Image (cartoon, rainbow, N blue to C red):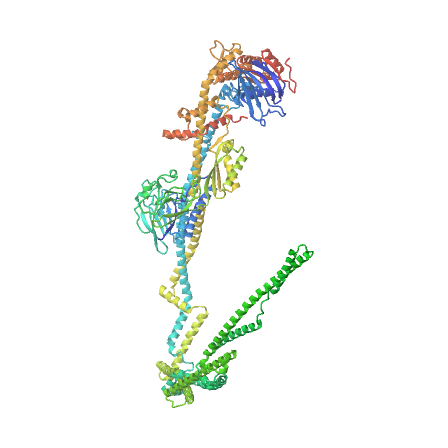
Amino acid sequence: MIIRSIRVQSYGMLRDRVFEELARFVVVHGPNEAGKSTLRRFIQDLLFGYSPASLEGHPYAPRDESKMGGEIGIGYASGEEAVLRRRLLSSAVGALRLGERRSKIANQPVDGVDAITRSIYESIYSLDREDLEFPEATWGEVKDRIIGTGGVKGLRTAREVAEELENEGKKLWRSDQRGKTIEAALRERIRDLKGEIRRATERDSEIREKEEALSRIASEKEALEQEKTGIRVALTRAERLLPYRKRLEWIAENEETAGDLSKLAGFPEEIEGFFRPLDGRIESLAGRVEQERSDRDRFAEQMGRFTPELRDVLERADAIEESVEQVAVLRKERADLDDLRSARERKEGAIRERARALIEDPGAAFSLRSVPAHEARTRIHAYRAAREERGALEAAREAAGGLPPPPSLLPVLLAGAVGLALVAGAVLFPESGRRPLLLGAGGASLLVVLLLGWSILSARRRHAGASLEAERRKDAFEEARREEEARLAAVRDSLRDVGLLPSRMAEPDEGLAEDLADLGRALEEREEILRRVESTSGRIRTREAEVLSLCGELSLDVSEAGEATRRLRRVLEEAREAERLHEEAAKRIPELDARLRGLEEEIGRARSEKESMEGNLLALGAGDLAACIDSLETRREALRRAEDERRRIEEEGEDLDALAAEIANLSSTEGDARLSDEEKVRLEERRDEIELRLPEIAAASASLGKEIELLRGEPGASEIEGEKKALEEELEAVYIRHDRLALLARIVREADARFRAEHEPDIVARAGELFSFVSGGRYERLGLDPEEERIELLTPNAVEGIPATHPVSRGTLDQLFLCLRLALLDHLEAGGEPLPLFLDDVLYHWDDERRERGIEVLRRVAERRQVFFLTCNGALARRLAEAGAAFVTLPGPGPAEPPG
Amino acid sequence: MSAFRFVHLSDVHLDAPFASKNEGVRKLLAGSLRRSFERVVGLAIEERVHALLIAGDLFQKPDPSIAAETFLLGQIRRLRGAGIPVFYASGNHDPVGWAKGTRRIEWPEGTTVFADGDPARHEVRTPDGDLVAWVTGAGHEGPAVEKNLAARFPAASGPLPEIALLHASVEGAGSLEAHDRYAPCAPRDLRGKGYDYWALGHVHKRGSPLADPPAHYPGSLLGLDRTETGEKGVLLVEVCRGAGARVEFRPTAPVLWEEAAVDAAGAATLEALRTLLHTRIVSAGHGEGVLLTIELEGVSPLKRDLEHGEGAADLAGDLAEETGLAFLAVRTGRLRRAVDRDGARVGPLGAALDLIAALREGKEPYDAVLPELARPLPVDAAERDRYLRSLLEGAEEDLVDRMRRGTP
């Protein structure tokens, strides 16, 4: 591939620059900052696409409005020609015209360069001064720089990477166990942890043992404290109880002298005076008994007065009281009866008075069962209505009077005849000069006839109507009169049995109806009075009979109701008083009986007490009663002494019962509260032993507790196990990481060896061929010494090679190194498209010999691939131009050394 | 018909070693395990259950520490004080009577220990002496019981609720693969025996391998490591004879493990990553009482920084302090380096990448590149290849990164 032309539209500092007819060997000359590197980057962007493919990120994006882009003309080894155009706008666009074919390639690499990546191209095909500097290193390193990295700049060599992997792996684990590897550290820590786990397990057992020991110590301590308490109690009791025992014995002796005085406890201090009040008390009680008995007899007599007859009266008390109450009612009813009889007489007088105005025989009024007053009133009302109607009709007829005769038609007929005559005259005498008068008169007469005739006819029609009305009134009057008569007959019929006076029957009116009603009511009221008189009389008789009957039942000889009532009330009162007294007696008698019994018992007890005391005294056996009294006083003195001693002991704060119990207990358990000296010493020694032992035990217990606490504070086996487990997991990861690093190292070394075996001979052969050319045949080829890891320069017919190192001149070595680098390009392309090579400011600092040899190499290389030589050195540029390089000048801001 | 109410727990693992280099975390977890057990006892007392059933692995090992023993007996005495009996069937971790195991523990009155492989049947009575249920249990007699203990359970036919208590691996149980298969059995071994409920233990993840009859694993009482995530606790069960069981999970663990995968590709700097993780932690509601493991994923330029020295650990420590988490681990195993493979296709590096691909695909034998390894390779060829292949995970990125390190 050869770049034939370059057109820069805008790229960094380059604007509208055109370079045409570029040769295979091009020297681009210009001062620093003229754009040489920019031009190289432009060509690489055109070949591989913009990187980065955005205006924002691209370092050569224009800062003005110009469009970034450009084109290059390409000639392929196959002879094809192409024009490649790219622009970087909002996105990267690209177009390739290959012959007649046009295609869009966006930002993809152009055909011919796509076999390698841009980074490789930039590394291998773009060399600067450092790239061509023969390294101050062994040939192994030289080869590594060229072959071990594939010639890619910036890559570390396979050997370096392998060593790094191996070193990292060795930091993790080493088979020779040398050094402090991570694995060794982990294993050591795990080993330590195992020891810690073992110790933790032992600690656990130790804790258990110590816990058990602590438990045993606690048991021993408890037992010793109990024993010590027992000893202390025994000694204390023995020392404390001895005096008390003596005093208690003294108390017991006195109590024994006193004996059992409980039966004589009631005796006062002055015994002889004891019996006098007792006798007085017995006498008093006997008096009270007599009084109570008298009262009882009196109440018994009261009870006897309540006889069966009185009981019978009380049983009938309700009936008696009712009879007494009935007598009061009876008295009132008798008064009512008298009133009723007076009312009857007054009522009968009133009836007779009313009857005289109505009935022919007033005495017969009392025989009337009833007076049809209501019916009579109804019929009288009907009769009075018929009578009034008939009167009204009659008055109407009289007011209407007789009818006049109807009006006559004669005047009409006369006027008509006159009119006709006048008209006829006019007709008959047409020639008469009076004809209009005749006609007028005749006409007026006819008109009068007409008016008069209409008036008379109307009057006659009214007359006929009035005649018909008079006829109807007459009929109605007749009807009313008949109705009046019928109603009167009905009234009379209804009162036929009453026997009314005829005068009251002539024209019955409202007054008759009222009188009849009054009579009827008076008769009814009389009847009611008669019924009440009868009823009251009957009740009075019944009640009087009942009262008398009750008196008879109670055997009371009375014949009159009033007397009977009085007798009944008196008897009832007597019976009730007797009953009250009976009840009082019945209540008091049991009380009196009880009190009598109590008094008698009390008398009995007093007498028994007296007899008992006397017996108790005599039972002392001292002889007669007086002697016995002396004996009692002696024994009482002994008892007082005992009690005084008891009181004193109690005042000392001691419980006598507890003391006695303690002494009794001590006596029963120890044989005797009074310990022997030996026993006391033995107990005291034992107590001292215990007191010495107890602090030891407490100290041991505290020590054990502290030890246990400390042991428990130590991490447990499981916790350590957790750390160990984590470290074992880490150790496992370390092994894996080591194995991985070791495997990768081996892989890298193996790959490196294979790569070298495959590529190194060809590269060295190609470099040898190039070197032979540029050395003018002085050296025929290059050789490899794998053992020494060096390259040898072989001259024609040489038996042994010359090691490519000092004292071979530096120029020769630089030349050799350049050949090796360029041979790598040929090797990598291996039949592919030879791509342009960029050399940036190389050679100029070499001495003349080295520079000339380098130029020779480049000239030879340019025969196969295009070479762009970028330099600001004018002399070097001139020399290159002389060697056949085409010249491209980039004027820049700084002065460039003129090419001459 | 009266209901039998009980608390079912298992896999307490008292004395469990909590694998962590962080002493604070180890102490937190050990304390939390005891706190969780105390809560179980409190729950049993509060709910006035008839019994507490422990389906094995009460201890991490047959010979518990005196601290664990003292603690446990104290808790059982609390239950005893409330009139709640304890039924405990040993598991593979705590085979009662094996070696110098738990036989020497002086169990308080009211504790029934099923130590033999042959099932035994015990009555459950209330404090008033009323018989409310029967519990049939069998224990592990050694640390690796391979017998089918469930098959030995007799048929139960009484009128009262019948409960089976066993530490076993029931085929089909979720996450069974994470556990050794001790006392293996199949669901058919549990069916048709007349038990109203199978109180199981061994699987640390809560689950039910069988619905009829109901068989439940309550799971471990506390997440023993970062893989045992989520809430942990016990089952509160109510059983009526022949009428199924009402099972209710009650969390008791005061701390729990959680996991979260975070794509770190969007974070270009450690500060950006810290902000991203902080946001994720807070938005997930994690805080005090959570031990969180964040697995970073995706391609990130920060892998080298995180894996260098204590980079990830420092980040985790800072975030835990900021968010109040009980513990935070940031893992970078799945994080991939952001490497520019340009330039990696030439030279020895390209050859190395080709060789890795060939090894991985089996086109090249490992023998040619086998280095001296820290430990002998597994004898089994498949296992050996699996191990070596695992070493090559992320090898390409690592190599390219190393080769280009220092490249501007």
| Frontmost residue, A675 versus A538 | A538
Residue in the foreground of this view, choosing between A543 and B145: A543
The image quarter containing residue B91 is top left
Q: Position of residue A113 (x, y in %)?
A: 52, 19
Count of picture labels: 0
| Image coords of residue A478 (percent x, y) | 51, 73
Residue A617 drawn above or below residue A457: below
Q: Would you place residue B3 above or below residue A310 in this image? A: above
Nearer the observer, A897 or B19: A897
Residue A496 appears anywhere in the view: yes
**In the depicted structure, whether residue A111 falls above or below residue A279:** above
Q: Is residue A683 left or right of residue A107?
A: left
Q: Is residue A581 visible?
A: no
Place residue A398 in its image quadrant: bottom right
Relative placement, left or right, of B213 versus A842 is left
Residue at the far top: name it.
A797
Whether residue A373 is situated above or below residue A177 in the rendered picture: below
- Residue most extreme to the right: A433
Q: Quadrant of residue A839?
A: top right
Q: What is the x, y in percent for residue A715?
A: 44, 43
Q: Quadrant of the C terminus of chain A?
A: top right
Q: Position of residue A562 (x, y in %)?
A: 43, 89
Q: Of A179 and A226, which appears nearest the observer?
A: A179
